[in-house]
Amino acid sequence: IDESAAQGVSCADTGPVVVHDTTGSKILNSTIRGTDKAWSDNYCGVRLEATNGAVVSNNEIHDFTGNWGHNDAAIMTYDAANSIIEHNYIHDSPAGIFLKGDHAGDGWPQENNIVRLNLFENCTNKSIFTIAGQTSQIYQNVIRQSQGYVYRHDGSAISGLTFANNTIVNTSGTTAVGYSVSSVAPTITGFRVFNNIFHGVFSEAINLGDTVSIGGQSFENNVYFRFSMFVSLN
C-alpha cells in the first residue's frame, strides 16, 4: 500500500489502513508507505480504533510525515484493547507506535496491548509513545534513532504499564524514558522499567516531569550509558 503513488488521498485524522469496531482483525506481511500531509491532524499508516484483539505483525510501515509532530505515526491506536503489535519494521515517521486515545468512560478502554519484537529507526519525535494504555506491555524492541521511549501521561489515571528488555541506541535527544505531563497534577502508578539498555547522548536518562503523585514506580536492572544527568522529578 503506497500512499505516495495511489490515486486519491486519505482523509484527515486517518490514513490508508483503518480498522474500526472489529474483533480479531489482522494486518500481516504488508508494506505500507505514506507521504507528507499538510493538514494539522492525525496521519498514520495503521489506525486501530475501537478494536479488540487486533494483530499487526511482520509489516514494514514508513514515511508517514506531516506538520503534526508525534501525531504523524506509523501505528496509532484509539480505544484498542488486547492488541498484539509485533515483528514490524517501522521507520522514517515522526512517531513509531502511538497508543493514544482512551474513552474508557464511554465503554471503550484502551488496555492490555502488547508491543514487542519491533525494530524502529529514524522516528524523529518518539519511537513508542503512550498517552493511554492500562496494563500494556512493551518489551524486546530495538530502537535506533534520535529519540527514545517516552511515556506521556495527560491527566487521566493510568497504571500497570511495563517497559522491559528493550534496547535503545540513540545519537541525540533529551530524555530516554520519562513523563511529559500536563498541569493537572496527574497520578502515575504501577510503571515498571526493567532489563533495558539505554545508550545515547541524552541530557538525562529519566525525567518524571511535573508529576505530583507517583506510586509503584520501578526502575531496575537497566543499563544507562552516556547521559549528562540521571534523573529529575518535579
Image (cartoon, rainbow, N blue to C red):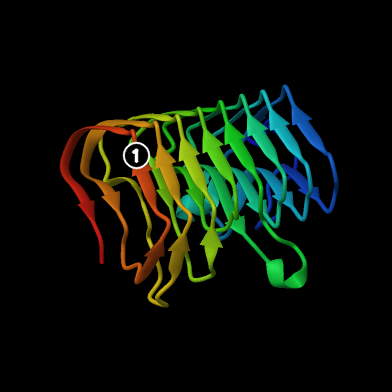
Query: In the figure, 143 relative to 81: above or below?
Result: above
- Residue 133, compared with residue 65, is above or below; it is below
Q: Quadrant of the N terminus?
A: top right
The foreground one among 150 and 41 is 150
Question: At 67% from the left edge and 23% from the top edge, which residue is drawn?
Answer: 58
Q: Horizontal placement of 159 versus 106: left or right?
A: left
The residue most toward the left is 228
Of residues 40 and 83, the one drawn nearer to the viewer in this rendering: 83
Residue in view at x 43 percent, y 56 percent = 216
Residue occupied by mark 1: 220
User: Which quadrant of the view contains residue 73?
Assistant: top right
Percent across and percent down for residue 72 are 53, 48
Q: Residues within 10 Å of mark 1 (few under 14, many from 20)?
A: few
Look at label 1 and name its amino acid: Glu
Instruction: Indicate whether 196 appears above or below 188.
Output: above
Q: Is 137 displayed left or right of 107 in the figure?
A: left
Q: Is residue 125 visible?
A: no
The picture places residue 165, in percent across and down from the top left corner, at 45, 29
